Amino acid sequence: MSLNRALIIGNLGRDPEIRYTPSGLPVVNFSLATDESYVDRAGVRQERVAWHRILVSGKLGLICQEHLKKGRLVFVEGRIRYADWNDKSDGFKHHRTEIVAARVQFLGASHADDMPGAHDPEDFAAAGTDASVQAEEPTDRRNPASKN
């Protein structure tokens, strides 16, 4: 038995970007920053930021594209995927680690109007802000993160 599951909370580093697979499935990506602080050997407090590439497809991706903006705090649950490819333009092999989101919860709203369905709790949950919408898997099995 194995498990591939990632749970992170962080801030968007940029606005989400959308593209479509050849089959028409929307795929949204954004970067998410997580930070940690620690005390180094000299006793000085240090901070470290890690950047994570997030992919969200289908209806949940469209909701993220519409409502997430740079700086927004979000919770993401998904699986880690590693992508490798050879770039024809420079001849180098490239690697990418990304989290394919199955669940996204919007956190830290500045006011209720920022949230979809804010005036109707049922719509709010259905919109995925409470992470109830499941992401759709791309039907195109090629690397959906690669540029076509």
Image (tube, rainbow, N blue to C red):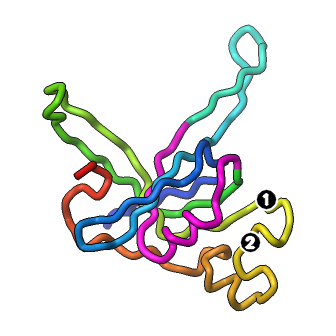
The residue beneath circle 2 is: 115
Residue 124 position by quadrant = bottom right
Residue nearest the viewer, comparing 107 with 15: 15
Q: Which residues are magenta?
A: 51-71
Residue 53: give x, y in percent of width and height: 46, 47
2 or 1: mark nearer the eye = 2
User: Relative to 54, is 128 above or below?
Assistant: below
The residue positioned farthest toward the top in the image shown = 42
Q: Amino acid at mark 2?
A: Met
Ranked by sequence position, the earlier of labels 2 and 1 is 1
Report the residue marked by disc 1: 108
Answer above or below: position of 140 versus 55: below
- Mark 1 crowdedness (10 Å alpha carbons): few <14, some 14-19, many ≥20: few
| Viewport quadrant of the N terminus | bottom left
Residue beneath the point at 39% across and 76% down:
136
Q: Is residue 93 left or right of residue 16?
A: left
